[in-house]
Image: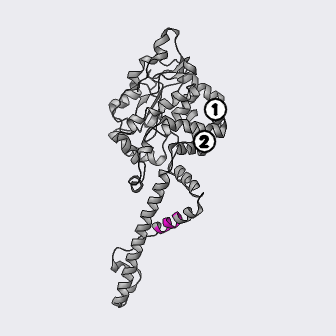
C-alpha cells in the first residue's frame, strides 16, 4: 500500500462527470455482494458531485476472492474497510477465512459496532413495557421456556431422584413419567408461544424504528464511524460494509451524503438502489442469516429486505422532530464542524463548467 498504489495525503482523488459514472457504479465483484460506488451524486444543488471511486459500499466481503481483493486494493486503491457489524458477526465471517486466504482485507479493517442484537432486543423491550400485562405474559413464557429440559429416559429420571435404589411401585413410576411428559409438553408449548409473540412484536417494527434506535441509542458509535471516514477518505478510498449492506451501511452512507451536501431526495434514492439486490434470493438469505432460525421461519422478511425511499424520509422526519435537523443531530452526538467539512471536501468535487447539460441531466446508474 505504500508503493504508489494509494494517493498521498492531500493528493487529489479522481473526478469524473456524472454521466460517465454508470459503468463504475454497476461493477460486480465476485464474493462481494451489493457492491457499488457512491459516486456521481449531485450535491449543493448540483454545484458539486460526489467523486467516483472514493466511497464504496457493500454487504460483507467475507467471500471475496483474489480477483475481488485485487480490484479493491490494487486497482481501486481501498485503504480502509469500515466494518459496522457486531463482534459476533465479524467473528463468524472470520471463520470463513476469505475462502482460505490469509484475511487479505483484515489489515485494512476498522471495526465500529453500529448495531447488535442487544440494541434491537432492548428496543423491543421498551416497547413491550408500554403494555405491562403483555410484558408479564411474555416473561412467564420465557421463564418456562428457559427451564432445563426433562430427562430423555425414565431410567435417567429414576437415577436423578435416587429412586432406582429402591423398589418403586408401578403406579408411582407411571405417575412420575406422566408428570415428566406433561412438563416437557408445557415447556415446548411455552417456547412456541414465546417465539410467536416475539415474531409478532418484530413484525410490528419498521426499519425506521430500528434506524432511529441506532441514531439515538448508539450515537457514540455513529460519531466514531463518521470520524473514521473523515480521517481515512482524504488518504484513500473507503469501503463501508455490514452483513447485508443495506441497514447499517445505508444509514451511515446517508449521513455521509448529507454531510457532503446531497439533498434528502438524492440520499433516499441512493439508499433505495439496494432494493434490487436485497429482494433477490441472495439478499433474502443474507437477511435471514442474521435472525435466529426459529424466528426467521415465523417472520415475513419482505419488509426487512426492501429498501424504500419512504423509510429514510420517515427517519429524517423523526430526526427533525427531535433534533431540529440532521445537522442538529450530528451536533448532539458530538460530530465537530471540522469533521463535517473534512467529509464534504473528501467526498465531493466542483462540477467543471464544461460539463453543462449532460452532467445536470444525465441518468445515474440504477
Q: Secondary structure at mark 1?
A: helix
Q: Picture coordinates of residue 72 (x, y %)?
A: 40, 28
Residue 362 found in image quarter: top left
**In front here: 328 or 137?**
137
Q: Picture coordinates of residue 131 (x, y %)?
A: 58, 59
Residue sitting at x 52%, y 9%: 353
Tell me: residue 366, above or below residue 215.
Answer: above
Question: Marks 1 and 2: in contact by CB < 8 Å?
Answer: no
Q: CA distance from mark 2 to mark 1?
A: 13 Å
Q: Secondary structure at mark 2?
A: helix
- What segment is highlighted magenta in the picture? 138-144
Q: Which residue is mark 2?
A: 219
Residue 259 found in image quarter: top right
Residue sitting at x 39%, y 86%: 163
Q: Earlier in the sequence, mark 2 or mark 1?
A: 2
Are there few (<14), some (14-19), or many (20+) residues within 10 Å of tag 2? some
Q: Which residue is mark 1?
A: 327
Amino acid at each position: 500500500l505504500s508503493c504508489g498504489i494509494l494517493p498521498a495525503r492531500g493528493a487529489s482523488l479522481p473526478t469524473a462527470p456524472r454521466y460517465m459514472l454508470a459503468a463504475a457504479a454497476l461493477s460486480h465483484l465476485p464474493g462481494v455482494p451489493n457492491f457499488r460506488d457512491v459516486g456521481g451524486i449531485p450535491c449543493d444543488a448540483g454545484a458539486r458531485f460526489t467523486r467516483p471511486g472514493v466511497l464504496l459500499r457493500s454487504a460483507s466481503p467475507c467471500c471475496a476472492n483474489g480477483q475481488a481483493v485485487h480490484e479493491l486494493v490494487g486497482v481501486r486503491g481501498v485503504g480502509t474497510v469500515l466494518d459496522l457489524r457486531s463482534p459476533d458477526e465479524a467473528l463468524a465471517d472470520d471463520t470463513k477465512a476469505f475462502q482460505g486466504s490469509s484475511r487479505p482485507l483484515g489489515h485494512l479493517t476498522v471495526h465500529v459496532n453500529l448495531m447488535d442484537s442487544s440494541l434491537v432486543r432492548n428496543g423491543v423491550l421498551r416497547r413491550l413495557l408500554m403494555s405491562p400485562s403483555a410484558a408479564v405474559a411474555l416473561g412467564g413464557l420465557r421463564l418456562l421456556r428457559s427451564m432445563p429440559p426433562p430427562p430423555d429416559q425414565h431410567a435417567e429420571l429414576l437415577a436423578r431422584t435416587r429412586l432406582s435404589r429402591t423398589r418403586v411401585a408401578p403406579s408411582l413410576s407411571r405417575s412420575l413419567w406422566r408428570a415428566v411428559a406433561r412438563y416437557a409438553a408445557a415447556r415446548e408449548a411455552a417456547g412456541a408461544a414465546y417465539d410467536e409473540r416475539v415474531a409478532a412484536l418484530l413484525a410490528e417494527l419498521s426499519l425506521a424504528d430500528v434506524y432511529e434506535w441506532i441514531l439515538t441509542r448508539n450515537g457514540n458509535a455513529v460519531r466514531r464511524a463518521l470520524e473514521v471516514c473523515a480521517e481515512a477518505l482524504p488518504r484513500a478510498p473507503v469501503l463501508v460494509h455490514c452483513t447485508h449492506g443495506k441497514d447499517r451501511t445505508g444509514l451511515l452512507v446517508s449521513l455521509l451524503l448529507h454531510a457532503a451536501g446531497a439533498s434528502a431526495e438524492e440520499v433516499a434514492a441512493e439508499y433505495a438502489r439496494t432494493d434490487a439486490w436485497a429482494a433477490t434470493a441472495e439478499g433474502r438469505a443474507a437477511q435471514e442469516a442474521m435472525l435466529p432460525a426459529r424466528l426467521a421461519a415465523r417472520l415475513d422478511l419482505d419488509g426487512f429486505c426492501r429498501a424504500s425511499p419512504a423509510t429514510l424520509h420517515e427517519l429524517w422526519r423523526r430526526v427533525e422532530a427531535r433534533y431540529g435537523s440532521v445537522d442538529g443531530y450530528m451536533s448532539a452526538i458530538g460530530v465537530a464542524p471540522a469533521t463535517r467539512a473534512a467529509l464534504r471536501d473528501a467526498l465531493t468535487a466542483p462540477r467543471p463548467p464544461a460539463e453543462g447539460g449532460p452532467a445536470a441531466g444525465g441518468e445515474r446508474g440504477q
